């Protein structure tokens, strides 16, 4: 009997319910996903024994912002990877986020494949070839036939 595949764990902290649900539904196709709507519940509910692999954190939330939350989470989850998402990126915020140790910054709005790609990069997962790349590779190996 084959062992079930263990999916990487992603924690989404996004206060916008629709965006939170959209991220959950998209990411659960490839990952184990846990979602929170604010920093306080994330810190209170997320068990320290379960080391999440990647945190996807919104910057602008009620209570602690994403940078403050990351600093607190890093005490419990020092090996995790952290991605900050925001529609408010400017030079000051980018500098502050990098200084706080975020591994990636993703401006809103973004395409869902962008988030998946960024997570896969941080986890060092092999990038699967797209169907277009596969077809190009196959057709480049085909002999040229003149009619």
Image (cartoon, rainbow, N blue to C red):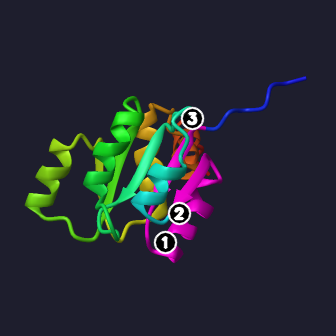
Disc 1/disc 2 C-alpha distance (Å): 6 Å
Q: Nearer the viewer, mark 1 or mark 3?
A: 3
Q: Residue 50, labelled with which disc? A: 3
Q: Are marks 1 and 2 in contact (CB under 8 Å)?
A: yes
Q: Are marks 2 and 3 in contact (CB under 8 Å)?
A: no
To which residue does mark 1 refer?
19
Q: 92 or 106: nearer the eye?
A: 92
Magenta highlight on residue 93: no
2 or 3: tag closer to the N-terminus: 2
> Which residue lies most toward the front here?
44
Q: Position of residue 130 (x, y in %)?
A: 54, 48
For the residues labelled 2 and 3, the Cα–Cα distance comes to: 21 Å
Q: Is 28 placed left or right of 83 in the picture?
A: right
- Residue 16 highlighted magenta (yes or no): yes
Q: Residues within 10 Å of mark 3 (few under 14, many from 20)?
A: few
Q: Quadrant of residue 57?
A: bottom left
Name the residue beneath numbered marker 2.
23
Region of the chain picked out in magenta, as a range: 8-36
Indicate whether 4 appears above or below 99: above
In the rendered image, the quadrant that contains the N terminus is: top right
Tag 3 or tag 1, which sits nearer the N-term?
1
Q: Residue furthest left?
A: 92
Q: Tally the marks.
A: 3
């Amino acid at each position: 009997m084959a062992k079930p595949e263990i999916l990487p764990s992603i924690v989404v902290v996004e206060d916008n319910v629709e965006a939170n649900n959209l991220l959950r539904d998209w990411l659960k196709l490839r990952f184990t996903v846990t979602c929170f709507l604010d920093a306080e519940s994330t810190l209170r509910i997320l068990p320290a024994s379960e080391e999440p692999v990647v945190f996807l954190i919104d910057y602008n939330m009620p209570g602690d912002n994403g940078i403050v939350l990351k600093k607190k989470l890093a005490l419990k989850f020092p090996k995790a990877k952290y991605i900050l998402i925001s529609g408010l990126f400017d030079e000051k915020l980018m500098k502050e986020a990098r200084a706080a140790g975020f591994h990636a910054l993703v401006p809103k709005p973004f395409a869902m494949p962008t988030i998946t790609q960024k997570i896969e990069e941080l986890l060092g997962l092999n990038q699967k070839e797209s169907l277009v790349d596969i077809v190009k590779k196959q057709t480049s190996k085909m002999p040229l036939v003149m009619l």
